[in-house]
Amino acid sequence: MRLFLSALAVSIIMITSVAHAAEVTAGDLVIEQAWARATTLSAKTGATYLAVRNTGSQPDRILFIETPVAGNAVAHQTRQEGDVSRMSETGPLSISPGGTLEMKPGAMHIMLMELSGGLKVGQQFPLTITFEKAGKVEVPVKIGKPGAMGSE
Amino acid sequence: MLNLRNIRFVLWMLVGLAVGSLAILVWQIAATEPQRAGTIEPGRPMAEGANWSLLDEAGRPFTPADLRGRPTLLVFGFTHCPDVCPTSLSYVANALQALGPQAEDVRSVFLTVDPERDTAQVMSEYTALFDERILGVTGKPEEVTTALKSLGAFARKAPLDGGGYNVDHTASMLLLDAQGRLRSTLDVHEPAEVAAEKVRRLLSTS
Ligand SMILES: [Cu+2]
């Protein structure tokens, strides 16, 4: 019975850790659904998407984004003007109290530049975000299909 | 008397305001006009009278003649574009999937707007990520510029703060008939089945 109970406890812990695998908490911030698109082996650029939810009463701001898989990681915004698509840096990103910063294809993304070795589907890489108030947070990023439209 | 004068003054103010805002509006429209170089006109012949010579991902020549014979799905983009281009290409891949065996009757072309970085080898690896049937096309930069202009597509390099550059470009996906005339555009916001249906309609009339 004891063995059964501990087994049950272990499996409950495992289930919850799986369920929360895509979610990372830092102070008042919850970072969820971090995913990227697979690229070719020789690709120099890639895109990562995630959402940051601010459960607190203070605004926070993203200061830096870093990852060992890329030389450079910058928040970008894609804009559609008529039938022309443009992309540029977003500048400082803030998350208002109770608000969510949501990234998705065709809109805001974290642009990875100077990738070394590309991004392989099914793998995972760490992304470190430094927030002004919540500090440094490491988020695991799941790599989906090259044309994925969301985290699977 | 004074009242009437006041009213007249206010009226003239309003006229002035209206003229002023109209001028600003006209000026704004005029200012955005040159950026609309890539306007898509249905029925526009894309192959007829065109003179450009590109290379496909296998290094074979690709010329306006290759836009004839069967309908073409034409996508503009570049491989350093991680956000918009994979969305477009996976949409095309899904449309081909939805077409089933009829997918063999249509040609899918991914034409680069960044020939300096997109060599035939790079294009070949990139298109294979989405569907082997999508043909990457690149070429000498001057030839690519000529082809884009001739196809009514817009492309302009935009430097990025962190170094390197992005290429602002026409994001519409074009559907040409077997004579190389523009018939319709595809929209990634529509289900892939809608794109497949547009292709099927074209196949049944050509
Ligand atoms: Cu970007």
Image (spheres, coloured by chain):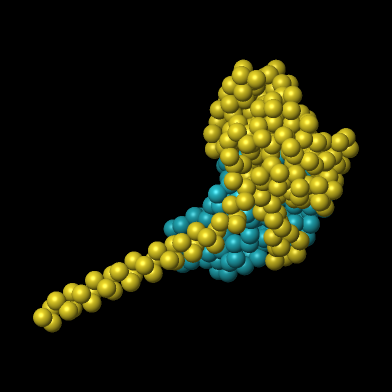
Chain colours: A cyan, B yellow
Marks counted in the figure total: 0
Q: Residue at x 67, y 46 (%)?
A: B153
Q: Nearer the viewer, residue A6 or A139?
A: A139
Quadrant hosting residue B15: bottom left
Residue at image location 66% in from the left, 27% down from the top: B177
Q: Is residue B180 visible?
A: yes
From this viewpoint, which residue is outermost toward the bottom?
B2
Q: Position of residue B115 (x, y in %)?
A: 80, 49
**Which residue appears at 74% of the width and 24% of the height?**
B69
> In what quadrant of the picture does the C terminus of chain B appear?
top right
Q: Farthest residue toward the right?
A: B59
A117 or B9: which is nearer to us? B9
Vertical order, B153 against B2 (above or below): above
Q: Position of residue A52 (x, y in %)?
A: 54, 55
Q: Quadrant of residue A147?
A: top right
Please state if B143 lies on the left or on the right of A23 as rendered. Answer: right
The residue sitting at the front extreme is B49
Which of the pair B64/A22 is nearer the observer?
A: B64
Q: Position of residue B23 (x, y in %)?
A: 43, 66
Specify the quadrant that holds the N terminus of chain B: bottom left
Q: Is residue B12 left or right of residue A43?
A: left
Q: Position of residue A151 (x, y in %)?
A: 61, 41
Q: Residue at x 59, y 62 (%)?
A: A90
